[in-house]
Amino acid sequence: MDSFELNKVAGAVLGTLLLAMGSGFVAELIYSAKPAGSAGYALPEPQPEAAGAAAAAAKVEPLPVRLASASVEKGTGAAKKCAACHSFEKGGPNKVGPHLWGVVDRQRAHESGFEYSAALKEKGGTWTYDELDHFLANPKTYVPGTKMAFAGIQAPQERADVIAYLRSLADTPAPLPAVEKAAAEDKPAQ
């Protein structure tokens, strides 16, 4: 191919590029973009919590009262979401989390064969009913730094059902806390 042919090919390529860019500039001059407007529907603004809602949330029954009316059968069903990470059988294996047989009144972060987070080891103590209730409500808030990636159980009665089920997972279940004593503690002094 001689140089004249190469010049024709290069001119054709450059001419095509100029035509493409030029048509884009011309299109922008002819057509102007319109604002999109409001697509869909307007979402309501979040309302601050009313005093009534806060008062209703504060009127959660004490744990001993909830445990007295708790259902082991409902707790068994509610604890199925825990089965992905925990085993419930006596002598069961540790999975992502430790096995939960006999967890009520068990020393916290001392189950052999499981590596607990440093935060849970520092917390120490035993898994009492009250401790389990707070932990199951929101593990990340109750023990910041825990490895447990569970959002928690928001419904107080569902937590009590799960705790009743966990209580049943023992050769000798721990005694339930007294209802009368907890109710007397919650009454304001006159």
Image (cartoon, rainbow, N blue to C red):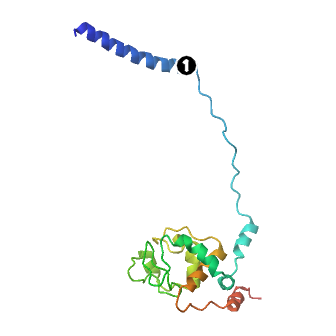
Per the image, the residue denoted by label 1 is 29
Which residue corresponds to the image point at 43% horizontal and 73% vertical from the top-left? 95
Q: Who is closer to the viewer here, 75 or 53?
A: 75
Which residue corresponds to the image point at 40% horizontal and 16% vertical from the top-left? 16
Pick out the residue farthest to the left.
Answer: 2
Q: Is 144 left, or right, of 163 in this rendering?
A: left
Q: Who is closer to the viewer here, 147 or 111?
A: 111
The answer to whether 19 is drawn above or below residue 63 in the figure is: above
Label 1, secondary structure: give it. helix
Q: x%, y% of residue 187?
A: 73, 86
Q: x%, y% of residue 180?
A: 71, 91
Circle 1: residue type: Leu
Confirm whether residue 122 shows in the render. yes
The answer to whether 24 is drawn above or below residue 154 in the figure is: above
Q: Quadrant of the C terminus?
A: bottom right
Q: x%, y% of residue 146?
A: 46, 72
Q: Is 104 left, or right, of 41 in this rendering?
A: left
The answer to whether 35 is drawn above or below residue 83 in the figure is: above
Q: x%, y% of residue 23?
A: 48, 17
Q: Who is closer to the viewer here, 104 or 14?
A: 104
State which quadrant residue 67 falls in: bottom right
Pick out the residue farthest to the top.
Answer: 4
State which quadrant residue 18 falls in: top left
Which residue corresponds to the image point at 50% horizontal and 83% vertical from the top-left? 101
Q: Quadrant of the N terminus?
A: top left
